[in-house]
Image (cartoon, rainbow, N blue to C red):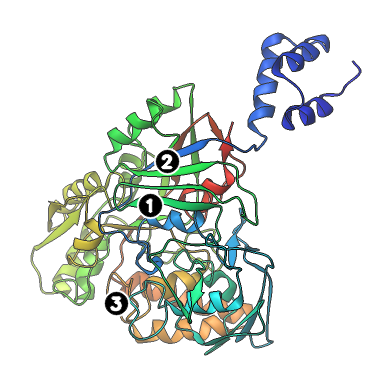
Amino acid sequence: MTISFIKMKQLVSTGKMSRRDFVQLSMAAGMTAVAGENLFNATARATPKKGGHFKSGLGHGSTTDTLDPGTWENSMVSDIGNIAFDYLVDIDTKNNVAPALAESWDSSDEVDRWTFQLRKGVEFHNGKTLDADDVVASINHHRGEDTKSAAKSILAIIKDIKTDGKDKVVFELNSGSADFPYVVSDYHLPIMPAKDGKIDPQAGIGTGPFKMENFEPGVRYSATRNENYHGESWFDSVEMLTILDVVARQNALQSGDVHFIDRPDLKTVQLLKRNAELEIDQVTGFGHYVAPMNVTMAPFDNVDVRLALKHCFKRDELVNKVLLGYGTPGNDDPLAPSIKYAIDPEPKHQYDPEKVKFHLKKAGIDRLKVDLSAADAAFAGAVDAAILMAEHARDTGIDINVIREPSDGYWSNVWMKKPWCFSYWGGRPTADWMFTTAYAAGVDWNDTFWNNARFNELLVQARSERNEAKRAEMYTEMQNILHEDGGIIVLMFNDFVTAHSKKVAHGELNSNYDHDGGYMYRRWWMA
């Protein structure tokens, strides 16, 4: 044979060799026609190429969604951040910080001053050239007393932001933060064009690979290729559809109406696996399903009531029956085992009727009756999980009344409104980020309304501690405090399970968030 398989693959990947020629040359080399065909298909699928319209069907989205990134609270709108926008930095497949709009960054010795060097020649969709003023205005949109942004808490460490010429941005912090570059990757912080020191958060204009075409909250979002994009992307256009009903979502995938769905029904995912036209992806990341209790409201203001509830249900059974094994039991610590400084607190919280009775007695309660609000908008199988928990709890002296809430509007009307409900977290890549977002006193997304003075003190100290051993000790103590005193019940860590048509392909997947870390619209391609 006068041409190697390596050379043949290169020709296929560049479109310079046809399927027919590839198969004939493979047969001449001793392969069967079927083997040659399979090798061609695998080679073609693994090669990114431009073109096509990509449609996703998501179990997220609400009629109350907006384009203001400070309000983004579900994956439907947070995905917009990687469709129409860019960030100062990205997160790579190894969960490291990677260059994006910032080419590089460095800090002072005390890690309380960070300088980001911007990429040159980047244009917004409206033709404006990116400069440091845009970054300052975009970040400041989430700061200040009047902001309602969910990112306000993680940005509280910033004392001042200023420009250093057109291409440098300097962040001066109130105290040291070794993890600060991770902070500016938060999906609430896309960079938008500034005018007179302000951004228009509802305009939908960014520097991202696609330009917004249409946005109907709770229905759809569509965008077309940005021909002036500074990086690589492959689809000509993309479209997200909100399909809250899991049966309708799976039917849309199987009928070819969409190329991708998240949150398939794990009870029937085996049927999807049997479909030769589909692929299932399973990624272990930081995501976890939770049952937050508002600790400012009775009876959850009593720590013994909280501990009783943490021991009243069988976590292994939730994983087996709700996740069908696609996950691991939680232990009321929101840090995934793969995150630096994560521990598994002791004593482990698991089903123990005697401990339930012990804590109820300490709380002065003979038999506890509580409401639990649930909808599958919180996570796939949430209603089933609530019913299962109620069955487990009944024999321990706790009566859980499951309230089935509507999925539409769940995040506006139930989460952080009802005393006890279900929620989910995609997780965060660092301990400080997770704790600062959800468990620091007074932050917007502290959905347990928990306030522990020692925890808050350690949070600030650990953030700037440069001695690794001391920092590890602090995070260990914080996890133990949250485990025993907090209002969070971490039910289970869920794997990200998604399904897609073989008409699209992808490389290695991110695990920091679902949807390939939100990057699938710019990374995936038509096979």
Q: CA distance from mark 3 to mark 1?
A: 28 Å
Residue 304 - label: none
- Residue at (40%, 77%) from the top-left corner? 152
Give whichever of 406, 164 is nearer the camera. 164
Q: Which residue is mark 1?
A: 76
> What type is the residue that disc 3 sits on?
Trp
Give whichever of 227, 255 is nearer the camera. 227
> What type is the residue that disc 1 sits on?
Met
Q: Which residue is mark 3?
A: 450
Q: CA distance from mark 2 to mark 1?
A: 10 Å
Which element is circle 2 on?
strand
- Residue at (59%, 61%) from the top-left corner? 90
- Residue at (57%, 84%) from the top-left corner? 464
| Percent position of residue 67, x then y | 37, 62
Is residue 114 something one can see in this rendering?
A: yes
Question: Is disc 2 in contact with disc 1, using a CB cutoff of under 8 Å?
Answer: no
Assign the C terminus to one quadrant of the image. top right
Mark 1: give few (<14), some (14-19) or many (20+) Cα within 10 Å: many
Q: Is residue 204 left or right of residue 311?
A: right
> What type is the residue that disc 2 sits on?
Ser
Assign the N terminus to one quadrant of the image. top right
Q: Is residue 5 left or right of residue 211?
A: right
Q: CA distance from mark 3 to mark 2?
A: 37 Å
The residue at the far front in this view is: 127
Q: Which residue is mark 2?
A: 56
Which element is circle 3 on?
loop
Dot 3 or dot 2: first in sequence order is 2
Question: Is disc 3 in contact with disc 1, using a CB cutoff of under 8 Å?
Answer: no
Question: To which quarter of the image does residue 332 belong?
Answer: bottom left
